[in-house]
Amino acid sequence: MRTHRTDLTTADVRAAGPAVVRSGPAAAQTVVVLDPWGEAKHAGLPATWRPLTEDVHVVWWRLPAAARAGLTNGALTGELADVEGPVHVVGADDAAPLALSLAAHHLDQVRSVVLVGQHVPDGDTHGVAVRLVPGGSIHSTHLPLGHPDVVTEVLQALMDDVTPAGSPMPETGSLAQDAVGAVATRLGELVSDLLGRHRAG
């Protein structure tokens, strides 16, 4: 007769599953998520993130599982060495200092940092754009990384990177302009759709 374990701790549950979940085209902009809570444990991203992966490469580090597997911060740094394009980093709660440290050591790659949580670390951001998403409520100790507010901030950071204010656009009618326009339009549609569904719900 098959028995079920009932002595699993919260730490055990968070550490279950893969250390890293990847989805989306590798040649696209990359979003690195530093997840201290072990979401995406079944190797699938939260539903709110999945539409992004048509245009964005998401690398979701499940930090409890990574620690269990013996993966260190050096492995995370090595991950960025394999990324060719721009990177956006998302760090929640206890992972916020790691997110800022990662950005500081990869200033040529990291375009923005999205920090999720009640408390964010003070200090020099080394010129990297930092977006803040307040976390937690009377009902929860933290805001899930799949929450629409988190995804919206990530999308806004991606859009700012694709069409930065004050920067010259590619030549009219060029393939480069078509590409930039297509990505910006797609990301804008995702923001509008996400906000619409969130408000309707």
Image (cartoon, rainbow, N blue to C red):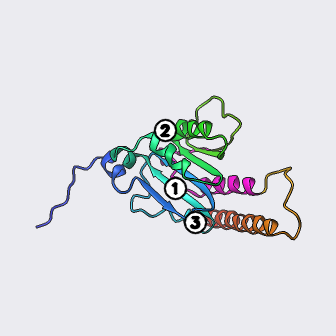
Start and end of the magenta stretch? 133-162
Foreground pick, 119 / 141: 119
Instruction: Tell me if residue 157 comes above or below residue 57 in the rendering.
Output: above
Instruction: Name the residue carrying label 2.
Output: 94
Q: Which residue is pictured at 43% across the width and 46% down the height?
A: 63
Do callouts 1 and 2 mark residues in contact (Cβ within 8 Å)? no
Q: Secondary structure at mark 2?
A: helix
Instruction: Look at the image and say whether residue 28 sits in the magenta stretch.
Output: no
Residue 201: give x, y in percent of width and height: 59, 65
Q: Quadrant of the N terminus?
A: bottom left
Foreground pick, 168 / 196: 168
Q: Secondary structure at mark 1?
A: strand
Task: Identify which amino acid the numbered label 2 is placed on.
Answer: Asp
Q: Which mark's residue is nearer the viewer, 3 or 2? A: 3
Disc sitting over residue 25 in the figure: 3
Which tag, 3 or 2, sits closer to the chain's start?
Answer: 3
Crowdedness of circle 3 by 10 Å Cα count: few (<14), some, many (20+)?
A: some
